[in-house]
Image (cartoon, rainbow, N blue to C red):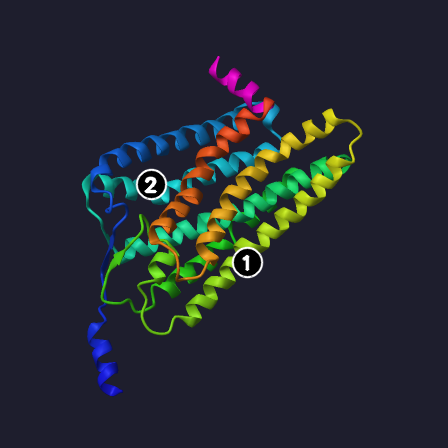
């Protein structure tokens, strides 16, 4: 028994850097993927930045709904900037090594922005719930002070929690291999490299998922169940269609983000392909920030009018 423990200790290494394999299994597509992801990154920055700009400049968009939309778009820009620049550098320069500190920093900021996104989506669902289910009380309930408190409550709680979460993860002992089969330092990918007893770290991770994933998701579903119930009670089909269109876009973004993230973080460790894991990660890392401005602008007349004023 002592001999086995000694052999295990010899195979453990305190790594100072990791290797992000990314899409190394597709050597002939490296420059194609670089061009594709670079274009997507620029589109995300420009489209979300445009929403931030027009909601600040156009007085018609100075309402709680667009206040949260503006902050959500800004958050999306921060969110993608944690992973995209590093992924593009690895694809372009084929330099896949990342220091332990840089990996921890990337994970920490990613978790902070992801948890903030979960809470902010919940706040946006609550805003739609008050606007549709209690329209007469909406100006009083969603006043400027309440909006600021809700926004602060979306950003602040995740910061200390995710810092502690990241510290606990990188306090683990990692196995002999330092290769992360992912395009960024995501929690499940780093967890696979851990040796020894990871039970405590896994419990912390699941608590984190419940607090910032499952509970917000259930609150959003609860809000929309009441919203849909209220919409169905409206007298005319035109009123029902018009009211539902104001919140269906938000529901689409919610489903894209939460479903893909839940599949990655809550499915069993074994019995799935790491390639599929990267594909699902692309959904919550790319599709939500990419489609968010398109969904809101193409399905919202106020945003389209503000955009026309801004362009012309």
Q: Counting other residues with Cα less than 10 Å from the Cα at mark 1, is it few (<14), some (14-19), or many (20 or more)?
A: some
Per the image, the residue denoted by label 1 is 211
Q: Tell me, for residue 293, which label it has, or none.
A: none
**Dot 2: what SS?**
helix
Q: Residue at x 25, y 50 (%)?
A: 21
Q: Which residues are magenta?
A: 302-312
Residue 136 inside the magenta-drawn segment = no
Q: Position of residue 198 (x, y in %)?
A: 39, 70
Q: Residue at x 57, y 50 (%)?
A: 153
Q: Position of residue 79 (x, y in %)?
A: 42, 43
Per the image, the residue denoted by label 2 is 84
Q: Nearer the viewer, residue 301 or 51?
A: 301
- Disc 2/disc 1 C-alpha distance (Å): 26 Å
- Choose top left, top right, bottom left or bottom right for residue 191: bottom left
| Left or right of residue 288: residue 249 | right
Is the residue under label 1 in contact with that under label 2 (CB below 8 Å)? no
Residue 311 inside the magenta-drawn segment = yes
């Amino acid at each position: 028994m002592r001999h086995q423990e000694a052999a295990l200790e010899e195979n453990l290494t305190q790594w100072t850097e990791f290797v992000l394999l990314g899409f190394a299994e597709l050597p002939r597509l490296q420059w194609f993927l670089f061009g594709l992801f670079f274009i997507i990154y620029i589109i995300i920055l420009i489209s979300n930045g445009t929403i931030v700009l027009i909601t600040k400049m156009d007085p018609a968009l100075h309402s709680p709904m667009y206040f949260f939309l503006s902050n959500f778009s800004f958050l999306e820009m921060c969110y993608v900037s944690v992973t995209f620049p590093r992924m593009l550098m690895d694809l372009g320069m084929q330099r896949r090594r990342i220091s332990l500190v840089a990996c921890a920093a990337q994970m920490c900021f990613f978790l902070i922005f992801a948890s903030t996104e979960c809470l902010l989506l919940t706040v946006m669902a609550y805003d739609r719930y008050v606007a549709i289910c209690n329209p007469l009380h909406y100006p009083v309930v969603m006043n400027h002070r309440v909006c600021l408190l809700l926004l602060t409550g979306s950003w602040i709680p995740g910061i200390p929690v995710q810092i502690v979460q990241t510290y606990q993860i990188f306090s683990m002992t990692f196995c002999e291999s330092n290769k992360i089969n992912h395009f960024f330092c995501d929690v499940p990918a780093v967890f696979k490299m851990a040796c020894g007893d990871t039970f405590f770290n896994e419990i912390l991770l699941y608590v984190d998922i419940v607090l910032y994933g499952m509970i917000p998701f259930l609150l959003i579903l609860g809000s929309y169940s009441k919203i849909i119930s209220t919409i169905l009670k409206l007298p005319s089909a035109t009123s029902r269609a018009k009211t539902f269109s104001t919140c269906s876009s938000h529901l689409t973004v919610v489903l894209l983000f939460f479903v893909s993230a839940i599949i990655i973080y809550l499915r069993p460790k074994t019995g799935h392909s790491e390639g599929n894991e990267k594909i699902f990660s692309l959904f919550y890392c790319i599709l939500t920030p990419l489609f968010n401005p398109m969904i809101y602008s193409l399905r919202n007349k106020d945003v389209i009018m503000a955009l026309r004023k801004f362009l012309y």
